[in-house]
Amino acid sequence: MKERFCQELEKYISAEHILKQEPMSAHTSFQTGGPAELFVSPTSEKEVQAALSLAKEEEIPFFVMGNGSNLLVSDEGFRGMILQIGKNMQQITVEDTELHVQAGALLSRIAKAALEHGLTGFEFAGGIPGSLGGAVAMNAGAYGGEMKDVLTEVTVLTPEGEICTLRAEEMDLSYRHSCVFDRQYVVLSARIRLQQGDREQIKARMDVLSQARREKQPLEYPSAGSTFKRPEGYFAGKLIQDTGLKGYTVGGAQVSEKHSGFVINRGGAESCEILFLIRQVQKKVQKKFGVFLETEVRLIGFEE
């Protein structure tokens, strides 16, 4: 990477937040992935704006990530800049029944803040292992709730480098979809509106959902959560199980024996093994049932 680019970047972002050849296995929930040529963790909207503007100006490839919980990075890594909106941008401000949340805040922290203020409506998201930015972009959901149920507005950075705020109804929110990727937006923050509730009831609901996750999901292994989107009229896990793929293994990667909708890192898996397993599952399910399983996991650094 051009040394001049790094020098220019340090005019906007502290050098301690700019890492070179950073292993992505340390930043993804699969715990796999080679090095990012440059790994940048901005601390403000202005720093995000400056870093991406400079990358475009210098024609440096870039990718914006959140908590890395829905990401598979190739074993060769990523040539360019990975910009993580994460722990340096996770402020949560509560005003009456509204929360203003920076994109790097974990959903678990948001749920905890809601509980502390006696606000209900976000219990569904407490166990989703991701950050707000990714949850907005994917319209994350679980146990009958989705982000679209609680969002009121979202502040984004546009491809033209402008920061603007959109109403929730402008976000084209549907099952595991928003306009974020379509329009190449970067989520910076969002407002969430909840309702006053009873703390004990909110806590009880969160405990029930947490217990359900522990019983049904392979939380003891690195994974990206549900690997596939739910195909209309079906359940991905059941299709995979009925294809005879429960426990199907490639190297250190495996279709979970606990929940067939999860691909897990049993230990020592490489990204290429995880991807090969995913492709085999897609191929075999489509052959048996004529249904293509679309992944929720995003791929970076792989050759097309």
Image: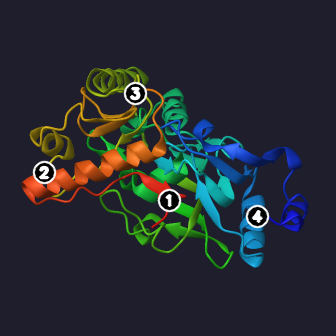
Between the C-alphas of marks 3 and 1, the distance is 22 Å
Disc nearer the start of the sequence (2/1): 2
Disc nearer the start of the sequence (3/1): 3
Q: Which residue is mark 1?
A: 302
Mark 1, residues whose alpha carbon is within 10 Å: few (<14), some, or many (≥20)?
some
Q: Which residue is mark 4?
A: 51
Disc nearer the start of the sequence (4/2): 4
Is residue 235 toward the left or the right of residue 155 in the image? left
Q: Which residue is mark 2?
A: 234
Between the C-alphas of marks 3 and 2, the distance is 27 Å
Which residue type does callout 1 highlight? Phe
Q: Which residue is mark 3?
A: 266
Between the C-alphas of marks 4 and 2, the distance is 42 Å
- The quarter of the picture where residue 86 lies is top right
Q: Give 160 or 205, whichever is nearer the viewer.
A: 160
Which of the two marks, 3 or 2, is nearer to us in this view?
3
